[in-house]
Amino acid sequence: MKSIIKNILFVNLLALMLAIVFFAGCQQKQDDSKDQVEANIKMYTNVWDEILNKGNIDMIDTHFASNYVNKTVNSTVSGQAEAKEFFGAFLTGFSDINFVVDEIFGVDDRVVKIWTFNATHSGEFAGIPATGNNISLKGVSVSRIVDGKISEELDFMDDLGFMEQLGFTLSPSSE
């Protein structure tokens, strides 16, 4: 009887030890994942501050994946060269840029930022001559970070409000 009780205690102790090891491993994985998300958020926030607020467009070379893709309602940007051209247009078309990350959070390899782009339209932008207008554009970006680089972004912004701030108005069609 004593040997049966010892065996039961041993099996229970072994099960308890395995459970502790298993859950400790799960916690370590959660901690590692949380650390990676925090690192992604820090890098991502810094990159956009450098590019838009400080005009350091070369951050694209070091912090964007070579196969980077950005999709908006109106366009798709593929690769680092197109990204430099696309975002560079904001740097040449606008001055007094103040890009603010209003809120940012992440899960796994995804980062979501809610942002505001404030600037003065002081140069040609997308074929639109400088208006001198102050603009404030709000948007949301859903991004994927792979191996510490920005790989993919989906940008959603108020395009209509942006165009209106640049002086364009839409009139109803007279068809």
Image: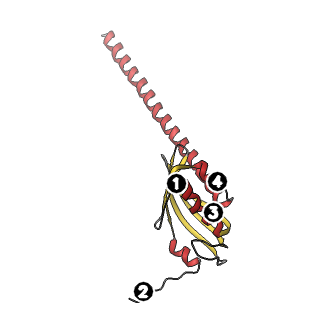
Q: Going from the N terminus, do you reach mark 2 or mark 4 first?
A: 4
Q: Nearer the viewer, residue 114 or 161?
A: 161
SS for callout 4: loop
Amino acid residing under circle 3: Phe
- Between marks 2 and 1, how big is the CA–CA gap? 37 Å
Residue annotated with mark 4: 58
Residue annotated with mark 2: 173
Q: Going from the N terminus, do you reach mark 2 or mark 1 first?
A: 1
Provide residue 51's location: percent of width, then percent of height: 64, 57
Q: Is residue 82 above or below residue 67?
A: below
Provide residue 105's location: percent of width, then percent of height: 53, 53
Residue annotated with mark 1: 79
- Between marks 4 and 1, how big is the CA–CA gap? 13 Å
Please name the residue shown 52% across and 82% down the image: 169
Please name the residue shown 51% across and 72% down the image: 159
Residue annotated with mark 3: 99
SS for callout 1: helix
Amino acid residing under circle 1: Gly
Identify the mark at residue 165; answer none if there is no mark: none
Does the residue at mark 3 contact the one at mark 4 (Cβ under 8 Å)?
A: no
Does the residue at mark 2 contact the one at mark 1 (Cβ under 8 Å)?
A: no
Amino acid residing under circle 4: Asp
Amino acid residing under circle 2: Ser
Name the colouring of the figure: secondary structure
- Between marks 2 and 3, how big is the CA–CA gap? 35 Å
Q: Going from the N terminus, do you reach mark 3 or mark 1 first?
A: 1
- Between marks 3 and 4, how big is the CA–CA gap? 17 Å
Front label number (2 vs 1): 1
Q: Is residue 25 left or right of residue 118?
A: left
Does the residue at mark 4 contact the one at mark 1 (Cβ under 8 Å)?
A: no
Does the residue at mark 2 contact the one at mark 3 (Cβ under 8 Å)?
A: no
